[in-house]
Image: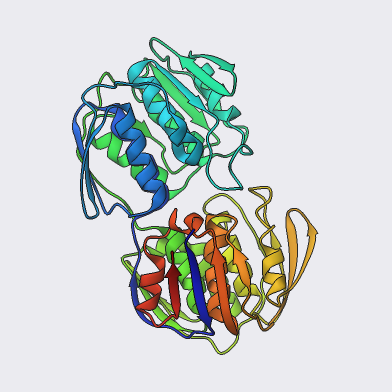
Amino acid sequence: MAKFIIEGPSHLTGDIAVKGAKNSALKILPAALLSDEKITIKNLPKIEDVDLAIDLLEVLGAETRRDGDVLEVQIKEIKNVELNSLANKLRASIVFTGPLLARAGEVTFPHPGGCVIGAGTRPIDLFLEGFKALGAEVTESNGYYSIKAKKLKGAEYFFTTVSVTGTETLMMAAVLADGTTVLKNCACEPEISALADYLNRQGAKISGAGTPTMTINGVKKISAGIFTIIPDRIEAGTLAILAAATKSTLTMTDCRPAHLEILLNIFKKIGIKFEAGADYLKIFAPDKFRAYSIKTHEYPGFPTDLQSPYTVLATQASGVSIIHETIYDRRLLYTDMLAQMGADIIMCDPHRVVVNGPTKLYGRKLTSPDLRAGIAMIIAGLIAEGKTEIDNIYQIDRGYENIDSRLRALGAKIARLE
């Protein structure tokens, strides 16, 4: 199994382009199922989760052609309505259920997999309840779910928990339903608005995307066109935190700082200087910065996917930070590895840790438990004295394209060993 070897500490410099958003790519790929026409997807990141999603499309009957960061997809006929074992490896496979149900009238799937914080633990009740509200029949047997509906019917549905994938899945299911669907307490992430804008250009009638209430008037047919994936705000935020934590001056290009207002506002408070334009973000190497407590929240609050990189940053801040994870259980377990590296971290309960800083970190042998904790381990390794070895880097490759070679171009001493 591949691993990363990092020699620290590192001070980086230069420009790094932000790749297309993982969380946008994994939603436009299922959206291709809504039409029998060819869709062209641009700025597609080369990551493991995207590869799995393309493989899943092909199992369902898609013809694909990929050239660099451009992918053409056409599903003239859906040949299979069962999401196979690939779904066990991909949490976002749940999003395929909405378009499949809308176009084919049925879908069968196992409980979706993914990383350790997702596999078997994130409930799918919101999806099942939503499909039932739209008139579908849901059955479960031997770990497989079967959903059928000759024709979905517009309905009103309230999300008892804000869910990004739930919002996107039911939105796509509703675009081909009879009548009007009103979704309430929706997630508001930029990736949702980008998906809705594309669908509207192809004939859908969606209003309110990016707000808590969405209205979808069903249509008979959805066309296909060109979709350019928006920049990955999580990658941009992670790189900004990496720059600050390693006390480096870095410029992130091809990004949208407007999607990172909460992080940049915190940077202002703690003394990390930056310059932001419409499509770039430059972080200036800080001499020191202050501690600041965070509490994860749905967009536009502090993203749970930036929590683990920010916790590494907190180990280098002056003072005490409380990190409160409100979205996912088990997402703070990686902090034990930071403690092994020398961080002063106290776990209060499964959702809160106290970080005292600044502390010196030292290289250790680590294992990446999940995608976002994995990138946090890389940041910690770049800060630490000596050699850091990170196993299970498949989890990192799931969401960050060629991260080792891109960091080497900035001066990092990081090597991939197969």
Which residue is found at the position 54% from the left and 56% from the top? 305
Q: Is residue 213 visible?
A: no
**In the picture shown, does residue 126 fall above or below 119?**
above
**Residue 397 in the image, given as x and y percentages of width and height:** 44, 57
Left-right relation of 403 to 124:
left
**Residue 6 in the image, given as x and y percentages of width and height:** 51, 77
Left-right relation of 407 to 338:
left
Which of the two residues, 158 or 14, is positioned nearer the viewer here?
A: 14
Which residue is found at the position 45% from the left and 81% from the top? 413
Q: Can residue 183 be seen in this view?
A: yes
Q: In which quarter of the image is the C terminus?
A: bottom left
Which of the two residues, 15 or 386, is positioned nearer the viewer here?
A: 386
**In the picture shown, does residue 185 fall above or below 131?**
below
**Residue 225 in the image, given as x and y percentages of width and height:** 19, 38
Left-right relation of 195 to 222:
right
Which of the two residues, 165 or 96, is positioned nearer the viewer here?
A: 96
Which of the two residues, 357 or 390, is positioned nearer the viewer here?
A: 390
